[in-house]
């Protein structure tokens, strides 16, 4: 992985950015940094769930996101992640879900910068892979202009060089996790100011970014990177298949999204041969033709057929027959 990969990343998303999803995303962009779902340190260290770290070598550059708030446990989990071969180890200081709050980690840690510093220092000391942080601009009644710079200073002094800031607060009382990704207002300017105030930090902005044009506009404001979550998941071809050209000035790896379907076939066949189910992979492919004539048919054939016992890769051809060819748009 190089510094340049950070210019665009796909956000960590529970239940969404699993290894199958990341394999697909990597077919669409050679350069974008891909994040795993959050894996809790407790599951790795106390639960022995090493399988949660599994990924395909094709996914590089790939970052694992850890959740936790206990320095020793996070250090042990970071060691396991480094052994597994991840390119980056990210600590979740932004996720507001109840489950995460009750474990006292995620966004609630914005209120405990000293504890976050202990955590990241332990993770840095335990292994050689870079440790990064994903955070919010604040939580609840905190004043972001005050707490965010103090937070960044504290984690910088603990050894963090790279941070992704979801540019809205998390309101820990009264909002669902979904509402917490939509309701608290976005403050991109504050993130730009943080980059200016901490030029030594690599700062990525996240939250509500829906196109590569928007991503480029953020980069033009001086931030080092842009992280895209939902748009990349729901419209992977719009975002990722155009990203290598728009962000890195390189030709895209594929001329058309259809080619990704072909390239997923051997991957899916191997997954099925291991006893996996078709829908576990195809559910991440539903948005592949979003916005194109026939996209609805593609989704319907896949979602109705992929759960059926014995469903195999032939279903992809049946679904693809619904999609109207778009010509050689990207091949020029
Ligand atoms: C389904 C879903 C699951 C998410 N899970 C995580 C997670 O595990 N860790 C995390 O830091 N953020 C998580 N997020 C938040 C995203 O990483 C991102 O910060 C947020 O969606 C805002 O970016 P976007 O507007 O580009 O989607 C999740 C978001 C979604 C939609």
Image (cartoon, grey):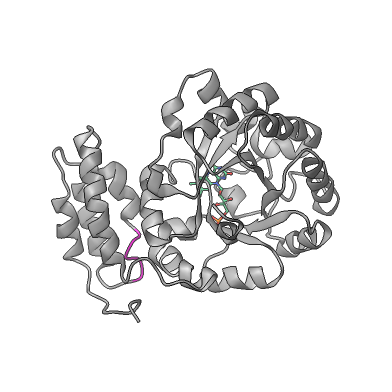
Residue positioned most to the top: 46
View extreme (bottom): residue: 332
The image quadrant that residue 247 belongs to is bottom right
Q: Is residue 299 visible?
A: no
Q: Is residue 238 left or right of residue 104?
A: left
Tell me which residue sits at (40%, 66%) in the image.
241
Q: Which residue is drawn at 19% across and 59% down?
A: 319
Q: Which residue is at 17% across, 49% downward?
A: 313
Residue 246 locus on image (x, y percent): 51, 73
- When asked about the image quadrant of residue 117, the answer is top right
Q: Is residue 80 magenta?
A: no
Where, quadrant-wise, is the C terminus in this rendering? Answer: bottom left
Magenta span of residues: 287-291
Give coordinates of residue 172: x percent, y percent: 68, 40
- Asked if residue 329 is positioned above or below residue 314 in the image, the reply reads below
Instruction: Compare residues 279 and 258 and report the one nearer the observer.
Output: 258
Tally the numbered discs: 0
Above or below, 192 against 95 in this view is below
Q: Where is residue 48 in the image (x, y as percent from the top left)?
A: 47, 19
Q: Is the magenta stretch mostly helix, strand or loop?
A: loop
Q: Quadrant of residue 331?
A: bottom left
Q: Is residue 97 visible?
A: yes
Question: Would residue 269 appear left or right of 120 to someone viewing this image?
Answer: left
For image coordinates 31% across by 70% down, the residue present is 256
Residue 32 lies, with reference to residue 151, above or below; the image says below
Counting from the top left corner in percent of width and height, residue 151 is at 80, 44
* Between 63 and 327, the one nearer to me in the picture: 63
Q: Is residue 162 left or right of residue 59?
A: right
């Amino acid at each position: 992985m190089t510094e340049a990969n950070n210019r665009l990343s796909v956000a960590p998303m529970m239940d969404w950015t699993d290894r199958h999803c990341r394999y697909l995303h990597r077919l669409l962009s050679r350069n974008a940094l891909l994040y795993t779902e959050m894996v809790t340190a407790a599951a790795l260290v106390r639960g022995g769930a090493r399988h949660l770290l599994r990924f395909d070598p094709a996914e590089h550059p790939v970052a694992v996101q850890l959740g936790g708030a206990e320095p020793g446990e996070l250090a042990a989990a970071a060691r396991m992640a480094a052994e597994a071969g991840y390119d980056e180890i990210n600590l979740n200081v932004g996720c507001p879900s109840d489950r995460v709050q009750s474990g006292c980690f995620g966004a609630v840690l914005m209120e405990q910068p000293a504890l976050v510093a202990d955590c990241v220092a332990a993770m840095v000391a335990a292994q050689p892979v870079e440790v990064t942080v994903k955070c919010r601009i604040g939580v609840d009644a905190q004043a972001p202009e005050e707490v965010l710079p103090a937070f960044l200073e504290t984690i910088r002094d603990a050894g963090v060089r790279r941070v992704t800031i979801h540019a809205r607060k998390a309101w820990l009382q009264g909002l669902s996790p979904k509402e917490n990704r939509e309701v608290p207002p976005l403050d991109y300017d504050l993130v730009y100011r943080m980059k200016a105030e901490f030029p030594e930090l690599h700062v990525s902005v996240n939250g509500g970014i829906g196109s590569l044009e928007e991503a480029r506009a953020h980069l033009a404001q001086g931030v080092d990177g842009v992280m895209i979550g939902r748009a990349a998941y729901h419209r992977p071809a719009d975002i990722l298949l155009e990203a290598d050209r728009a962000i890195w000035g390189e030709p895209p790896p594929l001329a058309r999204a259809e080619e990704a379907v072909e390239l997923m076939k051997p991957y899916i066949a191997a997954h099925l041969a291991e006893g996996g189910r078709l829908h576990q992979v195809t559910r991440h492919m539903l948005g592949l033709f979003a916005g194109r004539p026939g996209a609805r048919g593609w989704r319907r054939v896949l979602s109705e057929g992929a759960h059926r016992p014995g469903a195999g890769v032939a279903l992809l051809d049946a679904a693809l027959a619904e999609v109207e060819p778009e010509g050689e748009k990207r091949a020029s």
